[in-house]
Amino acid sequence: MSACSQIGSLEQAKWVDSYVSQSSLDLHQVHVLAALIDMNAKCGNMGRETMLFEKMPKRDLICFCSMIQGLSIHGHGVQAVSLFRRMINEGITPDDVAFTVILNACSHEGIVV
């Protein structure tokens, strides 16, 4: 998943996602879902990224940051800011990385917060 994320190959990401879904990996484990979210986000499969994120039983800071970064990379800065606000409303405290990710999203879109 990490390799697919780094090369940004949507075709490879879909293959890995399918393989993981059919394997014995427990897709309810947060770290597995977080890796799938990150891979799909970086490869541009925003629908799959969103579906995985929304079905997570418990979202953490890492998952939110992966989603926000994915939205930012693909030109959805307004949605990234909205998701950042949702993260805060769900009681998750942003760290330095989260602030960097959201500021980067705003910078790409020319958004002043």
Image: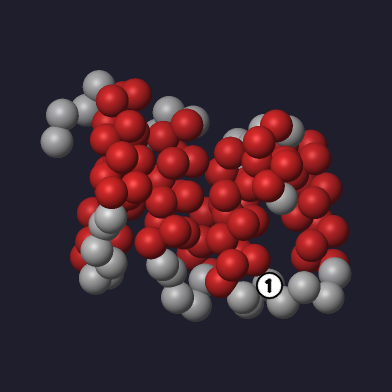
Quarter assignment of residue 25? bottom right
Q: Position of residue 74 (x, y in %)?
A: 49, 31
Image-based side of 68 in relation to 54, left or right: left
Q: Position of residue 89 (x, y in %)?
A: 22, 65
**Residue 51 visible, this angle:** no
Q: Label 1: few (<14), some or many (≥20) within 10 Å?
A: some
Give the total of numbered labels. 1
The image shows residue 88, relative to residue 8, as above or below, that is: below
Q: Nearer the viewer, residue 48 or 13?
A: 13
**Residue 20 visible, this angle:** yes
Q: Please report the residue visible at 49 percent of the width from the left and 64 percent of the height from the top.
A: 54
Q: Please report the residue visible at 27 percent of the width from the left and 31 percent of the height from the top.
A: 106
* Residue type marked 1: Leu
The image shows residue 85, relative to residue 21, as above or below, that is: above
Quarter assignment of residue 18? bottom right
Q: Position of residue 34 (x, y in %)?
A: 56, 61
Q: Please report the residue visible at 44 percent of the width from the left and 59 percent of the height from the top.
A: 62
Q: Quadrant of the C terminus?
A: top left
Q: Position of residue 88 (x, y in %)?
A: 23, 61
Q: Nearer the viewer, residue 61 or 44?
A: 61
Image-based side of 104 in relation to 17, left or right: left
Q: Nearer the viewer, residue 10 or 63?
A: 63
> In this figure, which residue is indicated by the disc labeled 1?
27
Quarter assignment of residue 76? top left
Image-based side of 71 in relation to 16, left or right: left
Q: Please report the residue visible at 34 percent of the width from the left and 33 percent of the height from the top.
A: 105
Q: Residue furthest front?
A: 96
Disc 1 is placed on an element classified as: loop
